[in-house]
Image (cartoon, rainbow, N blue to C red):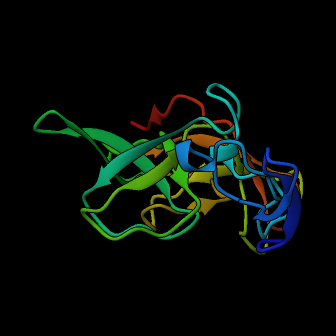
Amino acid sequence: MAGEKFPKHNGSGLFEETEAVQEGGPGSANKIAALDNSGRWATTMMPPGIGADTTALATSEDLASGDLVNIYDVAGTPTARKANASDTTKPCDGFVLAASTAPGPAIVYLEGPIVNLSGLTAGTRMFLSAATSGALTATPPTGGGKVVQYVGKAVNATTVNFEPEQPIKLA
């Protein structure tokens, strides 16, 4: 629980109260770690190479939590936008778990579970939608010029395990 305090020996024979922290970084050195509100360690508490495979990118449009995104180049800057199976230049490269407003940065996940979804059936194969940018669908797109891209499998009613495959352009 954030804000919990613990005794800490101050080196002069006395104890002082110290507060547990939920975020890592240089300012948190030598402090007691606490789980975050989800009951997990914050990824900033982990050493490099441990944790989610993410990258912070500029965005060219507003993104909502759970959106599938395409990463593309804008004048030398890697940028995220909503992926869409109706546009062959917008295959799915990752997803976001938090909303962001363009041009602000978004944390793009390149692997892992897409959580906080709803209405899924465990075991269902999920595809990039051609009808709604950034969305998942259980029905693969059809029709010339669109792409079929498997993005993962529903593991329960609220989570898809993200494992994207190469998109296939329909003739």
State whether residue 53 appears in this view: yes
Q: Residue at horizontal 82%, vertical 59%?
A: 35
Point out the residue furthest to the top here: 49
At 84% from the left and 72% from the top, the residue drawn is 4
Q: Between 99 and 31, which is closer to the camera in this rendering?
A: 31
- Give whichever of 10, 64 is nearer the camera: 10
Q: Position of residue 118 (x, y in %)?
A: 75, 74
Residue 69's x, y, as percent? 44, 51
Instruction: Answer with left or right where residue 149 lies relative to residue 131.
Output: right
Q: Is residue 1 above or below residue 67?
A: below
Task: Give coordinates of residue 61: x percent, y percent.
Answer: 28, 65
How many marks the image carries: the answer is: 0
The quadrant in which the N terminus is found is bottom right
The image quadrant that residue 18 belongs to is: bottom right
Identify the residue at horizontal 69%, vertical 51% (top origin). 126
Q: Dividing the image into 4 quarters, which one contains the C terminus?
A: top left
Closest to the observer, 15 or 20: 15
Left/right of residue 89 with respect to residue 65 in the rendered view: left
Residue 116: image quadrant is: bottom right
- The location of residue 41, given as percent across then percent down, is 78, 51
Q: Is residue 144 visible?
A: no
